[in-house]
Amino acid sequence: MRIMGLDVGDKTIGIAISDLSGTIAQGLTTIKRSSNKKDFERIKQIINEYEVGMIIVGLPKNLNGTLGPQGQKVVRFVEHLKEAINIPIILWDERLTTVEAERVLIEKADISRAKRKEVIDKLAAVLILQNYLDSQKNK
């Protein structure tokens, strides 16, 4: 079973997908947000195409563990997504994931600011999903 990782933002949704064994996450695409209906249709297409059995959605929390405005938006997004699809969806703490993604792109990949904007959400989705996959190996 493949697992999908989502990094949900106001303008884009980064999408990652696991391999069949649920060991390695890889970036798939970034959706430019338009409406929940269209976003959910695209997510459903990917679910069907890759035979996804579960979705991990990054939940942005403040450093003290509370939910800020963006975290609340993600919770609402997931509530609506659960109405549109019928596979398990797990919210996963993504504190500092986007910061880490940007650091990787700057330090390791030496990518320009313009290029970083294109791939940062997809890389954040990879980090969210990989963190989840790694946590499951230890269980």
Image (cartoon, grey):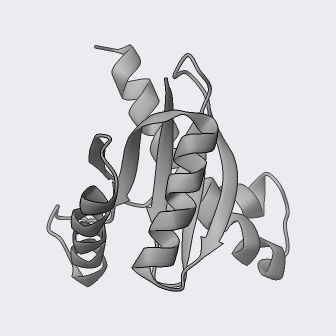
Count of marks placed on residues: 0
Apparent side of residue 134 relative to residue 28 in the rendered image (left or right): left
Residue 17 placement: quadrant: top right
* Residue situated in front as seen by the camera: 110 or 18: 18
Question: Residue 107: image x %, image y %?
Answer: 76, 57
Apparent side of residue 118 relative to residue 99 in the rendered image (left or right): right
* Residue situated in front as seen by the camera: 25 or 86: 86
- The quarter in which the C terminus is drawn is top left
Q: Residue at x 32, y 61 (%)?
A: 84
Q: Is residue 75 above or below residue 82?
A: below
Answer yes or no: is residue 128 visible: yes
Question: Residue 129: image x %, image y %?
Answer: 48, 41
Q: Residue at x 36, y 26 (%)?
A: 135
Answer yes or no: is residue 100 visible: no
Q: Is residue 3 above or below residue 28?
A: above
Q: Residue at x 44, y 37 (%)?
A: 131
* Residue situated in front as seen by the camera: 86 or 124: 86
Question: Residue 44: image x %, image y %?
Answer: 50, 54
Residue 134 placement: quadrant: top left
* Residue situated in front as seen by the camera: 56 or 35: 35
Q: Is residue 129 above or below residue 75?
A: above
Apparent side of residue 102 relative to residue 138 in the rendered image (left or right): right
Apparent side of residue 41 relative to residue 123 in the rendered image (left or right): left
Q: Residue at x 72, y 65 (%)?
A: 119
Question: Residue 83: image x %, image y %?
Answer: 24, 61
